[in-house]
Image: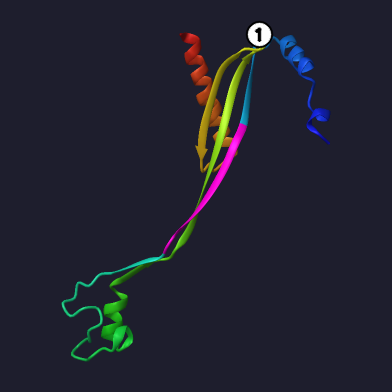
């Protein structure tokens, strides 16, 4: 099924809006969407507050690497902090809104907006609509 078979004919649609007393029509369209995934590598940091270092023995006993004895293990484990690697995905949506005069078919206003990492389409739509209406009301006062 193509869009022409389910979309109302333009003239019929405009006539219906005018019959309802509408003076203008607002259209909102998703123009473009991109996603980017980045990997943040794992990291670790060693902190050594002990004068003998993180691999030294404990209580006079020698240590052989980080697991040579309790002292070596404690000095290694207690002073090493690690963060695992992780992926993050950033999604950007490019939205365009236009207001048209129904009598003249003139574009009264056109805006483009970038929305990033929205958590809810409902919340983003409501916030976008509120900002758009605020902008239109500001223009009406001028």
Residue at far bottom of view: 61
Is 7 included in the stretch rendered in magenta? no
- Front residue of this view, candidates 27 and 69: 27
**Neighbour class for label 1 at 10 Å: few (<14), some, many (≥20)?**
few
Q: Position of residue 32 (x, y in %)?
A: 59, 37
Q: Up-down: is 92 above or below 48? A: above
Looking at the picture, the colour scheme in use is rainbow
Residue stretch in magenta:
30-41
Q: Up-down: is 42 above or below 56? A: above
Q: Position of residue 12 (x, y in %)?
A: 79, 16
Q: Is residue 114 left or right of residue 16?
A: left
Q: Position of residue 62 (x, y in %)?
A: 23, 91
In the picture of the structure, the residue carrying the numbered disc 1 is 104
Q: Is residue 57 left or right of residue 92?
A: left
Residue found at x 60% / y 34%: 31
Q: Is residue 59 left or right of residue 125?
A: left
Secondary structure character of the magenta stretch overall: strand
**Image quadrant assignment for residue 18:** top right
Q: How many marks?
A: 1
Residue found at x 52% / y 49%: 36
Residue found at x 58% / y 25%: 97
**Image quadrant assignment for residue 26:** top right
Q: SS at mark 1?
A: loop
Is 33 included in the stretch rendered in magenta? yes
**Image quadrant assignment for residue 80:** bottom left
Q: Up-down: is 14 above or below 63? A: above
Q: Position of residue 16 (x, y in %)?
A: 76, 14
- Front residue of this view, candidates 136 and 94: 94
Q: Up-down: is 56 above or below 127? A: below
């Amino acid at each position: 099924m193509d869009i022409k078979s389910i979309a109302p004919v333009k003239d019929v649609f405009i006539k219906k809006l005018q019959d309802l007393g509408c003076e203008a029509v607002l259209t909102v369209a998703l123009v473009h969407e991109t996603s980017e995934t980045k990997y943040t590598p794992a990291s670790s940091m060693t902190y050594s507050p002990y004068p003998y270092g993180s691999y030294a023995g404990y209580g006079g006993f020698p240590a052989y690497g980080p697991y040579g004895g309790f002292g070596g293990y404690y000095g290694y484990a207690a002073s090493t902090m690690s963060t695992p690697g992780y992926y993050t995905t950033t999604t950007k949506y490019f939205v365009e809104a236009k207001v048209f005069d129904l009598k003249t078919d003139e574009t009264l206003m056109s805006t483009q907006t970038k929305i990033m990492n929205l958590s809810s389409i409902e919340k983003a739509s409501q916030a976008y609509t509120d900002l758009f209406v605020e902008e239109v009301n500001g223009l009406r006062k001028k």
